[in-house]
Image: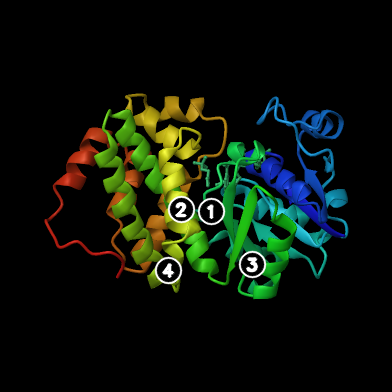
Amino acid sequence: MAKVAVMGSGSWGTAFANVVADAGVADVVVYGRRAEVVDAINQRHENPDYFPGIPLNPAVSATADPAKALHAADFVVLAVPSQTLRDNLAAWREHIGAEAVTVSLMKGVELGTSLRMSEVVTEVLGVSADRVAVVSGPNLAREIAERQPATAVMACPHEPAAVRLQHICKSAYFRPYTTTDLVGVELGGAVKNIIALAVGVAVGMGFGDNAKASLITRGLAETVRLAVSLGADEHTLAGLAGLGDLVATCSSPLSRNRTFGERLGAGRTLDEVIAETKQTAEGVKSSESVLALARRADVEMPITEAVVAMMHHDLSPAEALAAFMSRTAKPERYGM
Ligand SMILES: NC(=O)C1=CN([C@@H]2O[C@H](COP(=O)(O)OP(=O)(O)OC[C@H]3O[C@@H](n4cnc5c(N)ncnc54)[C@H](O)[C@@H]3O)[C@@H](O)[C@H]2O)C=CC1
Ligand SMILES: O=C(CO)COP(=O)(O)O
């Protein structure tokens, strides 16, 4: 059997390890930093920090030793906050086998470099892009831990690797598709978090479904503009990793990004919201790196700009709304 190492025992790492165990065709081990979480997974088959009361497949084992998790792993699945990937990966690098396929579950863009997560992996590990895959789609981790039906996309420029990954994930409740469009899949995942922050702000301000649908639709348009200008296939963004994830995240109270925005829109200060947020809301930091990418590519992303201004430059939700609504009138365009 193939061996899968899931590096990160947070929300999505735990749920994804369970997906692999439930698919039943690979061995899976989770690496977690905290001994009590590792012990709970091994002894009680539960992750009490993230999914109390939800039974994990007993075949999911855990370790606090990264070398043990990575030893002879065929797939190395990365499930840590995007901004911590570079340092984590540098510490794990010596234990990752030369033939392993690295799989990113992360939906962020690195601050400072504006690199996508797969690009950070190729840079730090010194491997070719063919050895790096990405899993994305409408995948709210809690629903998946509860074994509710979901679909996802497995992206890798080397299609056979995506197909192998699909095989080790497919189960009665999890249906993976494949694609070779890594750029479209990664940017779809990173930008939807930013749009979810904006939708959350609108919800927190008390606005209804028209505002939400407007942000989702115009958010998709700016995602397509950026992704296509960086080499993505526009159709990818109409798929699970684009529209699918955007709709799920912007609709769900389970989304950390949407919840973050909602608290801000309801009148809490940024510092209060940051203090209240225990899990990773990737869009807060990635909004800056995505905007830097957009400026470099000369692509207009007005919703992303508004989110950056609210998250990093003290613009109030009311001011952001006024700025957005007073933009010059123009024809509707989708994509380039
Ligand atoms: N939770 C979800 O529903 C989904 C999350 N994702 C993506 O998966 C990635 C991981 O997210 P989650 O598992 O939800 O996050 P989380 O906040 O639940 O867990 C993060 C994990 O990373 C570990 N970690 C390792 N190094 C760390 C460091 N230096 N600082 C902080 N934590 C560190 C933490 O201990 C924790 O186990 C993110 O990029 C997110 O966008 C993607 C799809 C679904
Ligand atoms: O990526 C996700 C669903 O696909 C999870 O969204 P949040 O990170 O906002 O919770």
Label 3: which secondary element: helix
Which-is-in-front pick, marks 3 and 1? 1
Quick check: marks 3 and 1 in contact, CB under 8 Å? no
What is the quadrant of the C terminus in the image? Answer: bottom left
- Labels 3 and 2: the sequence-earlier one: 3
Q: Amino acid at mark 4?
A: His
Q: Quadrant of the N terminus?
A: bottom right
172 vs 119: above or below: above
Q: Residue furthest left?
A: 329
Circles 1 and 4: CB atoms closer than 8 Å: no
Q: Residue furthest front?
A: 172
Please report whichever mark, 3 or 1, sits nearer to the chain's N-terminal start. Answer: 3
Q: Secondary structure at mark 4?
A: helix
The residue indicated by pointer 2 is 244
Residue 191: give x, y in percent of width and height: 43, 53
- Assess mark 1: CB under 8 A from ligand 2? yes
Identify the image quadrant of residue 294: bottom left
> Which is more toward the observer, 203 or 93?
203
Please name the residue that numbered disc 4 is placed on: 235
Q: Amino acid at mark 2?
A: Gly
Residue type at mark 3: give it. Answer: Glu
Query: Which disc number belongs to residue 123?
Result: 3
Q: In terms of depth relative to the viewer, which is nearer, 308 or 246?
A: 246
